[in-house]
Image (cartoon, coloured by chain):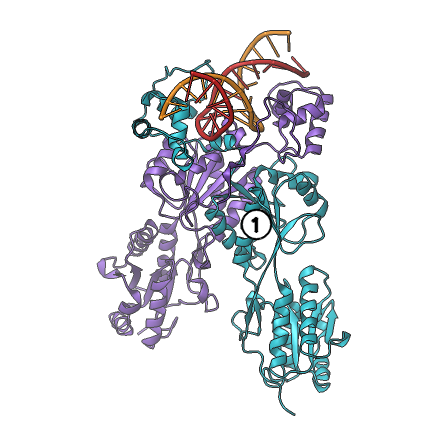
Chain colours: A purple, B cyan, C orange, D red
DNA sequence: TTGTATGCGTTATCAA
DNA sequence: TTGATAACGCATACAA
């Protein structure tokens, strides 16, 4: 901790650089160009052309030239303080953005975020608050730092509601990646799990399955309940039994989804099983293992599907029926929404459609 | 408690955007507490306790109380402007930071970068070489954008030297991830390929191998030549032949490293082969394929090693001897160095040690 | 022990 | 057309 503030010498009021300064200011550009600082601001922000501010071509050229030579870059803090915009978009995640365990990574989203941000002319500020305890990283003020940017994208489901609400109330543009209706006024972009889940059930029903069971974990996240809703919707739409027996909910799929149980289901007339997707993929893993252990052939005797994608480590296995979440598109969409919010345009939270995946884990039910 | 007391006592009378004036400032806290704004700043920043600034307990209490009632949150932009620093670290990569193809991703480095940045109290700004945003994104001024941060980390080997040199000359803190001695004065953090490569050879020599051949691509990047140096060092240290015959250099491993050639080497007494690691992993792939095609058993008749890690798509194959590059640590180390640079502390570019990996691709040579 | 005055780099408003 | 000048909200030497 050897800092001691680097007691920056304050040279009275000289606009001239005292020796070697790493960040040239507008004043210096002005001096080099032989104009006033205000003119530099005008030219550099392009506000002269946008509004009807007339600036001589000559001056323009000189200023741009000077800025180029000096390598001038506007100070984001100053810019923002003066009530202008930064061209900076914040990204705040409540776990590390780059976790060691890639399975929980936001990487796929970031691909889209980065691309769209570039298109919209924004750079990204990654707020590191959540991971390790930096300066005032954790704690009350953590979220406040994002105000440096023009707006901020939030990833992860554990965003503290009150702090977020405060930002929104203060008129700070905020977009949450993932549906979020608990926090008043927070805009969000989510995947349409309901429709996607319904589509999977529909596909199974059309293949001829009459009894289908959903295996889900004991989690009340929107992502989970949405899937269940879609699943039940699909059943009802197909005129299939959608009672409590259609959903098997367990806190520990690994021990509770047994071969015996699967066999019982099968003997009872169940010909298709659907597992929800979660971080760990526990439901899907358990289901696969149990079906295997029960000696049931898939997609011969039973058909399987997952409401999402299988976990990455099963990527070499045969592709199961299910749907793909367009994560990159979600990221891009979120940036677009945020950008509109910043521009003060009217906006609306949106759902992005997932794409159905036929896979090879399902077929028509065996005819008795 | 939103207090819309529009008639605040404010000097001047400029029309301020409504959304902006919704947050209380230190001045208002001061007024409510009956003290000066400066005192509020002192108390709220905890600078009174850190340094020996004496503030009466009474005042302290009043200020905190007032801040609490008003719901005061500091403006990061203002704070950073006044402090003459951003607490922003730039990360500049010459490809997209989040490429679609994860194989070329900087992810492993970023893990360490993010963590250490958080520890040091920095947030991250991600610049992309290809970004369409900003004034002059591509081309000459591209690198200048990074001046927005307090310092910048560069990833990838294609950083244009003159531009980097310019930044350094201007006193802008810069750290390059990867050894870089072509550009005057640029600090860097690199992996110690020389020692690591030497260790691999030593291990092979200790296992009893007397003739070892290195297969490398036709690339003069430091990462490549370092490996060769280490390899030759290792040979000499073990008293083994380290002439030109010990290194096979080819622009096209795939067609030049044939089964016939490998068999010839083997009949000539070569019992161990070492491939350098590159982006594509071409040398290692070719070597494996050729040995396989030659019908030589590994690790029975020949031993293999790679100077680094095999490409990600071979991750399910048996683990070859070689070494692991501690990418996360490299990232963290780079941030630490950059942070020191910014603080004006004396610094030095560093090499980080790689960790030896025994693997299963080598054993003692077959005794004739 | 606390208050005063000023600067940080921009943007924005006028007057010249 | 351009140039002073005043905020923006906070931090800090220096005076009281």
Q: Residue at x 44, y 37 (%)?
A: A145
Percent position of residue B329, x then y: 53, 57
Percent position of residue D8, x then y: 47, 23
The answer to whether B343 appears left or right of A283 in the picture is right
Viewer-proximal residue, B310 or B44? B44
Percent position of residue A168, x then y: 38, 33
**Residue placed under numbered mark 1 in the picture:** B337
Q: Is residue A41 visible?
A: yes
The answer to whether A359 appears left or right of B330 in the picture is left
Residue B32 in which image quadrant: top left
Viewer-proximal residue, A145 or B98? A145
The answer to whether A271 appears left or right of A107 in the picture is left
Q: Residue at x 55, y 42 (%)?
A: B343
Q: Residue at x 43, y 43 (%)?
A: A135
Q: Chain of mark 1?
A: B
Q: Is residue A23 above or below residue A93?
A: above
Viewer-proximal residue, B167 or A248? B167
Q: Is residue A206 above or below residue B148?
A: below
Q: Residue at x 27, y 73 (%)?
A: A263
Q: Is residue B25 visible?
A: no
């Amino acid at each position: 901790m050897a800092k001691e503030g680097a007691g920056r010498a304050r040279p009275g009021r000289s606009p001239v650089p005292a020796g070697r300064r790493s960040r040239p200011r507008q004043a210096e550009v002005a001096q080099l160009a032989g104009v006033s600082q205000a003119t530099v601001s005008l030219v550099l922000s392009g506000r002269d052309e946008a509004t009807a501010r007339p600036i001589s071509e000559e001056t323009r050229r000189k200023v741009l030239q000077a800025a180029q030579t000096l390598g001038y870059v506007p100070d984001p803090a100053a810019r923002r303080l003066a009530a202008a915009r930064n061209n900076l978009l914040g990204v705040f995640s409540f776990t590390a953005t780059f976790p060691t365990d890639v399975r929980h990574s936001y990487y796929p989203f970031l691909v889209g975020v980065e691309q769209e941000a570039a298109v919209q002319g924004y750079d990204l500020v990654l707020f590191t608050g959540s991971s390790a305890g930096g300066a005032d990283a954790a704690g009350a003020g953590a979220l406040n730092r994002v105000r440096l940017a023009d707006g901020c994208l939030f990833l992860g489901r554990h965003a503290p509601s009150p702090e977020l609400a405060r930002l929104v109330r203060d008129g700070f543009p905020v977009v949450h990646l993932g549906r979020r209706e608990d926090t008043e006024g927070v805009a969000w972009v989510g995947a349409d799990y309901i429709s996607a889940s319904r589509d999977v059930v529909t596909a199974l029903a059309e293949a001829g399955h009459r009894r289908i069971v959903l295996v889900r974990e004991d989690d009340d996240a929107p992502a989970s309940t949405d899937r269940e809703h879609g699943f039940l919707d699909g059943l009802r739409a197909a005129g299939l039994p959608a009672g409590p027996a259609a959903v098997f909910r367990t806190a520990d799929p690994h021990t509770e989804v047994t071969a015996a149980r699967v066999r019982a289901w099968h003997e009872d007339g169940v010909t298709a099983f659907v597992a929800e997707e979660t971080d760990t993929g526990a439901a899907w893993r358990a289901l696969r293992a149990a079906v295997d252990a029960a000696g049931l052939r898939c997609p011969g005797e039973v058909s399987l599907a997952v409401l999402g994608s299988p976990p990455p480590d099963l990527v070499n296995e045969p592709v199961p029926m299910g749907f793909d979440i367009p994560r990159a598109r979600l990221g891009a969409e979120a940036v677009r929404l945020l950008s509109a919010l910043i521009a003060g345009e009217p906006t609306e939270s949106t759902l992005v459609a997932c794409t159905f995946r036929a896979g090879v884990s399902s077929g028509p039910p065996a005819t008795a």
